[in-house]
Amino acid sequence: MTRRGCHLCDLVSGPLEQLAMARGLQLLVYDIDSDPDLRAQYHERVPVLLWGRRVLAEGRFDPGSIRELRAAASSSSTIP
């Protein structure tokens, strides 16, 4: 989840795109300001990285640690 003009979103977008490509994953980017429900849910939290419906990271985070977060999320439960 992202929004235009978000400097934290800009910082993580490139590294996340590279990581997704390297792993053969598709990165879906949603602008929260294009949907009132998303804006209400994620307004102060962007960027927010989800794996399925599980929040892996939000706000200020290190894209390099995403592999570990994803592995932990995947091993703890099935993610739709």
Image (cartoon, rainbow, N blue to C red):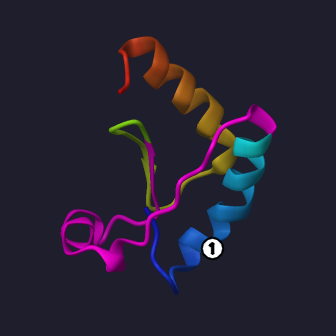
Q: Is residue 47 left or right of residue 35?
A: right
Q: Position of residue 11 (x, y in %)?
A: 66, 69
Count how many numbered circles sit on residues in the image: 1
Q: Indicate the secondary structure of the residue bearing disc 1.
A: helix
Q: Residue at x 73, y 34 (%)?
A: 24
Q: Is residue 56 above or below residue 61?
A: above
Q: Position of residue 6 (x, y in %)?
A: 51, 80
Q: Position of residue 70 (x, y in %)?
A: 54, 29
Circle 1 Cα neighbour tier, 10 Å, few/some/many (<14 / 14–19 / ≥20) = some
Q: Identify residue for label 1.
A: 10
Q: Is residue 61 above or below residue 55?
A: below
Q: Is residue 38 magenta?
A: yes
The image quadrant of residue 26 is: top right
Q: Is residue 63 left or right of residue 55?
A: right
Q: Is residue 77 left or right of residue 49?
A: left
Q: Quadrant of the C terminus?
A: top left
Q: Residue at x 53, y 31 (%)?
A: 69
Q: Residue at x 26, y 73 (%)?
A: 39
Which range is magenta?
Answer: 22-50
Q: Is residue 17 above or below residue 25?
A: below
As drawn, the residue found furthest toward the bottom would be 5
**Which amino acid, mark 1?**
Asp
Q: Quadrant of the N terminus?
A: bottom left
Q: Is residue 20 magenta?
A: no
Q: Position of residue 7 (x, y in %)?
A: 57, 79
In this view, the residue in front, 16 or 64, is: 16
